[in-house]
Amino acid sequence: MNPLTIKVACSNCNLRELCMPVGLSEDQLQRIDEVVAVRRKVKRGGTLFRNGESFTSLYAIRTGFFKTCVATEDGRDQVTGFQMAGEIIGLDGIVNDHHTCDAVALEDAEVCVMPFDRIEELSREVTALQHHVHKIMSREIVREHGVMLLLGSMRAEERLAAFLLNLVQRLHARGFSQSELVLRMTREEIGSYLGLKLETVSRTFSKFVEEGTVEVKQRHVRILNTDALKRIVNNQQACH
């Protein structure tokens, strides 16, 4: 067991609405509390799980930011996703009982460990939990599908605009600003995720800045014109 583990209770967690089903009775919530046995801290750059490791638990991110990635044949890291507080990570392991990617903390993070066999067991009794797990899984499928569309057909500007809009929308659901964000990942990691070269990511950011769409100060990004980003994604750029 990781030494950095702490007993946890969902019933008094401020992220409860984000990662737990709504409308549970006190008794049901108590049962879920019993399932979520511990919290685990992961230092920046540390790994929560690795590709090939056997799958035992799902993890609810309590604080911090993660990337999931796989090593390509030529030894590069291919980023497959970014996950933030209030999101569930580890679903990749359900299919074959082992993880298919590495999960790396992009900043100091803390997760709640949810043993999957206990979740399945409890899901059979608490239908709200079963629906919730299905909802999380289908959201993941929809997200993957969105990424495939993104990489299949979009130009660099469309990819980066969609990425920024998605990120700010997810942060807004957690009570953050609708227009300002701190990028926890590097330009290189964004490029890896979006299938773009580092220079292309930097050039596209510069283009957005020149057009007055965003303001960029190192990792701080402020979206000045959300509609312009949406137009880019919908490929209906206003004629200049």
Image (cartoon, rainbow, N blue to C red):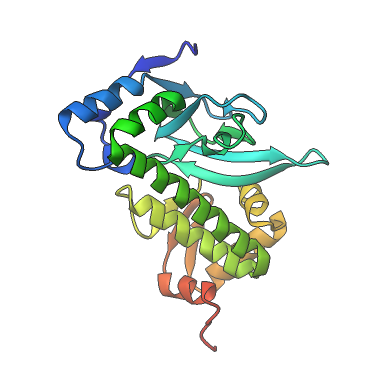
Which residue is pictured at 38% across the width and 60% down the height? 179
Spot occupied by residue 129 in the image (x, y as percentages of width and height): 32, 38
Spot occupied by residue 127 in the image (x, y as percentages of width and height): 29, 39
Which residue is pictured at 50% across the width and 24% down the height? 42
Query: Position of 185 compared to 133: left or right?
Result: right
Residue 100 vs residue 83, the one in the foreground: 100
Spot occupied by residue 56 in the image (x, y as percentages of width and height): 52, 24
Quadrant for the C terminus, please: bottom right
Q: Is residue 180 above or below residue 133?
A: below
Residue at the farthest bottom position = 239
Spot occupied by residue 81 in the image (x, y as percentages of width and height): 57, 46
Which residue is pictured at 41% across the width and 33% down the height? 60
Q: Is residue 198 above or below residue 156?
A: above
Q: Quadrant of residue 52?
A: top right
Query: Position of 46 compared to 203: left or right?
Result: left
Q: Quadrant of residue 168?
A: bottom left
Query: Is residue 182 in view from this perspective?
Result: no
Residue at the farthest front position = 124
Q: Is residue 161 above or below residue 38?
A: below
Residue 204 vs residue 189, the one in the foreground: 189
Query: Is residue 143 in view from this perspective?
Result: yes
Residue 159 vs residue 221, the one in the foreground: 159
Q: How many marks?
A: 0
Which residue is pictured at 46% across the width and 72% down the height? 230
Q: Is residue 77 above or below residue 204?
A: above
Residue at the farthest left position = 26
